[in-house]
């Protein structure tokens, strides 16, 4: 089985590639442009881990370069595609919206066009819980439009889902979008909450909690997310009697379904790191939702997805990795 994974040097992409290549049943081609967002050193460290697997090959390329990406796909001829490459970060989208247009709109269009020209059995792409807008009801259900997106990042992810739906309808592609909910774990990005908070606690620097620490997030451990990705990937839409010939673009939540207040998240990290946090309580942000929580009924019914790792256990694994990898200068 041949699987092409974009964003292979990223957080979730690294874990997906590692699981696939370690299974010894897959030939994995990882694609990443190794841009300067987040930590290039961390991306290279992830790739060094992946390159120990016999079934993994890496190509540095920008999937937004349509001719180059189409050539990669044509030459590799993947059975499956996992599109995890994207410009991430809600707050950074306020500073550099052009980066989100390039990766999340132009780049995704390039990936869809390559799939149209040489269709894989199934293409799974990363969406985000951020697509649930200002009026979304908790728990978030996939058929709840949720109103207006609260950030430009969310707007590009919502647009990506619409683009995928049009390609599934027009070209008969088998596509599935996964709305990830606050993924955490070892090898996470430096700009993500676990790394920011763990460093602040370790170094004794200020740790900012917006909405006075009352934001609730549906933290989902990365191994559970990988389970969801692979279960969905290997179970494309099969159709049923009376359904249209063209497959739909399915959308699934991938979360934990147990939101936790940020104050509690910090308390667990304090206990694991053995140091108190220097907390600065701040007002809410206009780009942030008060709470996120995934309704998992649809993905459970489709592929039997059930998250297994508790927040306490997941953060223990994260801290074990953090203390080995992220040593102070």
Image: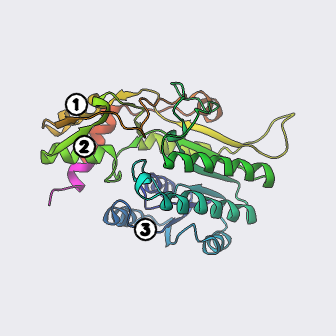
In this picture, is 301 found above or below 26?
Answer: above
**Disc 2 target residue:** 197
Real-space Cα separation, disc 1 to disc 2, in angstroms: 11 Å
Q: Disc 3 vs disc 1: Cβ atoms closer than 8 Å?
A: no
Asked whether residue 214 is drawn in magenta, I would say no
SS for dot 2: helix
Q: Residue at x 56, y 59 (%)?
A: 26
Task: Specify the color scheme.
Answer: rainbow
Residue furthest right as drawn: 242
Horizontal side of residue 168 vs 317, given as left or right: right
**Disc 3 target residue:** 34
Q: Earlier in the sequence, mark 1 or mark 2?
A: 2
Q: Residues within 10 Å of mark 1 (few under 14, many from 20)?
A: some
**Disc 1 target residue:** 267
Real-space Cα separation, disc 3 to disc 1, in angstroms: 34 Å
For the record, the magenta segment spans 321-329
Real-space Cα separation, disc 3 to disc 2, in angstroms: 25 Å
In this picture, is 298 found above or below 165?
Answer: above
| Residue 233 visible in the picture | no
Q: Position of residue 281 (x, y in %)?
A: 23, 33
């Amino acid at each position: 089985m041949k699987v092409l994974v974009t964003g292979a040097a990223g957080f979730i992409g690294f874990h997906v590639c590692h699981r696939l290549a370690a299974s010894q049943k897959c030939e994995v081609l990882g694609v990443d442009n190794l841009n300067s967002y987040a930590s290039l050193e961390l991306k290279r460290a992830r790739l060094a881990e992946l390159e120990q697997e016999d079934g993994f090959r890496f190509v540095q390329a920008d999937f937004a370069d349509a001719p180059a990406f189409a050539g990669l796909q044509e030459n590799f001829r993947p059975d499956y595609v996992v599109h995890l490459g994207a410009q991430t970060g809600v707050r950074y989208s306020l500073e550099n919206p052009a980066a989100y247009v390039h990766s999340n709109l132009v780049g995704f269009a390039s990936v869809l066009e390559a799939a149209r020209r040489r269709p894989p059995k199934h293409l799974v792409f990363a969406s985000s819980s951020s697509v649930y807008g200002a009026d979304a009801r908790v728990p978030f259900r996939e058929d709840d439009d949720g109103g207006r997106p609260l950030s430009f990042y969310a707007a590009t992810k919502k647009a990506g889902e619409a683009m995928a739906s049009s390609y599934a309808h027009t070209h008969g592609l088998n596509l599935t979008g996964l709305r990830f909910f606050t993924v955490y774990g070892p090898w996470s990005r430096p700009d993500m909450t676990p790394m920011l908070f763990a460093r602040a606690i370790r170094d004794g620097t200020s740790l900012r909690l917006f909405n006075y620490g009352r934001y609730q997030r549906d933290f989902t451990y990365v191994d559970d997310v990988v389970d969801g990705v692979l279960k969905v990937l290997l179970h494309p839409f099969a159709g049923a009697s009376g359904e249209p010939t063209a497959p739909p673009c399915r959308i699934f939540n991938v979360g934990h379904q147990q939101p936790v207040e940020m104050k509690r998240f910090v308390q667990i990290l304090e206990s694991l790191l053995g140091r108190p946090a220097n907390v600065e309580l701040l007002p809410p942000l206009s780009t942030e939702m008060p709470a996120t929580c995934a309704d998992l009924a649809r993905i459970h019914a489709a592929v039997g997805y059930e998250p297994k790792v508790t927040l306490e256990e997941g953060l223990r694994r994260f801290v074990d990795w953090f203390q080995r990898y992220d040593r102070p200068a």
